[in-house]
Amino acid sequence: MPASVRSLSRGWALASCVPVLLFLGLVACASSAPPPVPPAGASSPLAGHGGRAAADHGATAMPGAPAGPATDASPVVPDVPDGLTAERDGYRLDAHLTELPAGRAVAYPFTLTGPDGRTVTEFVEHQTRKLHFYAIRSDLTGFQHLHPVMAPDGTWTADLAALGPGGWRMYASFLPDTRSRRGSEIVLSRTVTVPGEAVPVRLPAPAGTTTVDGYTVALRSEPTAGAHRLTATVSRDGRPVDALQPYLGSYAHLTAFHEGDRALAHLHPTDRVDGDRGGPDLTFYAMFGRPGNWRVFLQFQTEGRLHTAELTLGVG
């Protein structure tokens, strides 16, 4: 074969190999590349605190919950506000009182300031209220859950029942009505001192049941920090109670505080109110930010009377 013909043949052979090599290279790159990042999921069913959407999605829909099981023995705990600071994300709880008298009812005025430095006056209702206020002593006794009234200038006033001597923490839980924060809860707090000789009460040991006003409340939960489902059952004289009345948009309200630092846990009711009778089982999504003992306060209403059941829950 003449040299010119052989040269031409080799050129055609090389040219024909190029597409094949390119194809093989692309296949190799695709097989070694990391999988695509899935799109972000739908908005949290807990935005606005509970309701049907949260109940329909299950515990995996908790905001900040891990997408799958942890790879080691340590609990994966999301970064959620625990209410232990007076300022977060530019919002601040301002109160001029640092000491309150013992043994008598007292008013506790305060304001909430936004990132722009102005007093916040627009709020989104969550659990039927624009603001939830809590008070607890350092030994987790004296729990109070109030719904203050806001004056036109943005000043709130919490009318506290008599406080015993000791150190107290005052919490404000709210949702500011702004485009960037709508549906995102903020919990802020400040401490006050009540003068006098404080007699601390030892925290009761963890237990699965407690009684209040003749009712028995049984609590079932996963004993680990993080996001999970918690169920309470109300009974009386051994019989399930199915006559719970609506309270704050659900058939019960649940608050918990961590022993030692008094971190506040986010416990959201998921039971949809359907008429004037509910129970005996009540479901919550619990967000325990850390392990340890938590003092749990379950509030429910029957025959127009509010009951507050207390028990200690151990979280691993």
Image (spheres, rainbow, N blue to C red):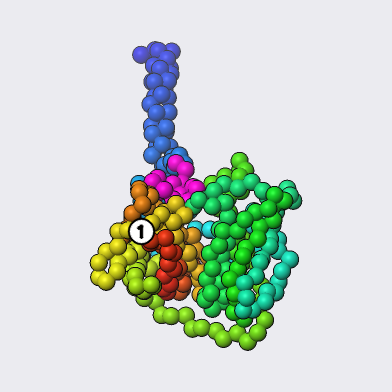
Across and down, in percent, residue 6 comes to 39, 16
Residue ranking furthest to the left: 239
Q: Residues within 10 Å of mark 1 (few under 14, many from 20)?
A: many
Q: In the image, is residue 277 above or below residue 109?
A: above
Image coordinates of residue 120 in percent, x first then y, are: 68, 50
Residue at the image position 50 percent from the left and 50 percent from the top: 128
Q: 244 or 179: which is nearer to us?
A: 244
Residue extending furthest toward the front: 303
Residue stretch rendered in magenta on the structure: 42-55
Res 150 seen here: yes
Residue at mark 1: 244
Q: Which residue lies at the image location 41% right of the left edge and 73% below the top edge?
A: 311
Left or right: 140, with 275 as reference point: right
Residue situated in front as seen by the camera: 4 or 240: 240
Q: Compare residues 45 and 10 and report the one nearer the observer.
A: 45
Quarter of the figure with the N terminus: top left
Task: Classify mark 1: helix, strand or loop.
Answer: loop
| Quadrant in the rendering for residue 223 | bottom left
Q: As shown in the figure, which amino acid type bears the numbered disc 1?
A: Leu
Q: Position of residue 164 (x, y in %)?
A: 59, 79
Q: Residue at x 67, y 76 (%)?
A: 101
Q: Magenta residues: mostly which secondary structure?
A: loop
With respect to residue 215, does 112 lie above or below?
above
| Magenta stretch holds residue 21 | no
x, y percent for residue 139: 54, 78
- Taking the image as drawn, is residue 228 in sight? no
**Which of 24/41 is in front?**
41
Number of on-image labels: 1
Q: Is 46 included in the stretch rendered in magenta?
A: yes
Q: Identify the residue at image location x=41%, y=54%.
A: 246
112 to the left or right of 51: right
